[in-house]
Image (cartoon, coloured by chain):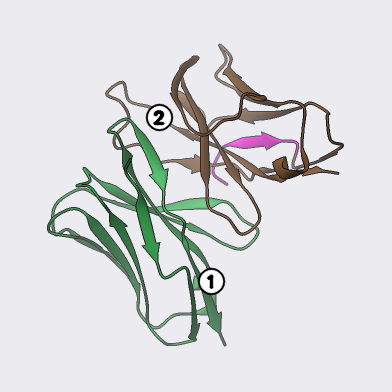
Chain colours: A brown, B green
Amino acid sequence: DSGVTQTPKHLITATGQRVTLRCSPRSGDLSVYWYQQSLDQGLQFLIQYYNGEERAKGNILERFSAQQFPDLHSELNLSSLELGDSALYFCASSSGDRGGGTNEKLFFGSGTQLSVL
Amino acid sequence: GQQVMQIPQYQHVQEGEDFTTYCNSSTTLSNIQWYKQRPGGHPVFLIQLVKSGEVKKQKRLTFQFGEAKKNSSLHITATQTTDVGTYFCRAPYYGQNFVFGPGTRLSVLP
């Protein structure tokens, strides 16, 4: 058990809908990352938060947004869903040193499998 | 921009054979990490390499960081069925963010 909790584990929805994925980082970790993994594909970085503030942005679509709350949990909001958004969404956390995180080891949650029908 | 490449994309080995995956960067890296993702699972951190020419071992796994710090390798001696999964390297991108390589998927035939 990595200590990172993601809910829900599975989500089935229709095109055009909006969903929210939730992540609770490991106790004490300040950084939260979101990744998208399509079937048999690699890990595409979406966005990172550190202590409530956006730290880095990857290939995140404008239809997607995220935030990190004061209690450090994070939510990833996906709207106007398309078939191509079906994927496994991972959250990861790290301690998030203030120096830019060049040595951050990531702990991943079990992921949320999103199916858009 | 920086790209991190991994070869091979897929590798099928007979149980007991050795396996090596390579991670190559177009630029010098400050450090590199390796992760393993079992089928149906989530990525799990294996190791981090920082120094030029660094070699680290974990049981049957040997990790190397190139002298020029542009490439790294993961070698598994005498593979077992428990080694099945996808191995990813992760490297700094523009000093602030990190990118994962595309991964090498290992299949081990019993």
- The front one of A80 and B59 is A80
Which residue in the protein does label 2 denote?
A95
Tell me where residue B41 appears, x and y as whole percent.
Answer: 61, 55
The local crowd at label 2, few if under 14, some if 14 to 19, many if 20 or more residues have their Cα within 10 Å, is many
Asked whether residue B20 appears in the rendered view, the answer is yes
Q: Does the magenta segment cover residue A44?
A: no
The local crowd at label 1, few if under 14, some if 14 to 19, many if 20 or more residues have their Cα within 10 Å, is some
Q: Is residue A116 above or below residue A16?
A: below
Q: Quadrant of the N terminus of chain B?
A: top left
Q: Chain ID for label 2? A: A
On screen, residue A14 versus residue B53, left or right, reads right
> Residue at horizontal 32%, vertical 25%?
A97
Instruction: Determine whether the residue tagged by mark 2 lies in a helix, strand or loop.
Output: loop
Kind of residue at badge 1: Val
Tell me where residue B57 appears, x and y as whole percent.
Answer: 27, 65
Q: Residues under labels 2 and 1: Cα distance?
A: 29 Å
Which disc, if any, is residue B84?
A: 1
Tell me where residue B5 appears, x and y as whole percent.
Answer: 37, 57
> Residue at horizontal 46%, vertical 60%?
B103
Residue bounds of the magenta highlight: A1-8
Kind of residue at badge 2: Ser
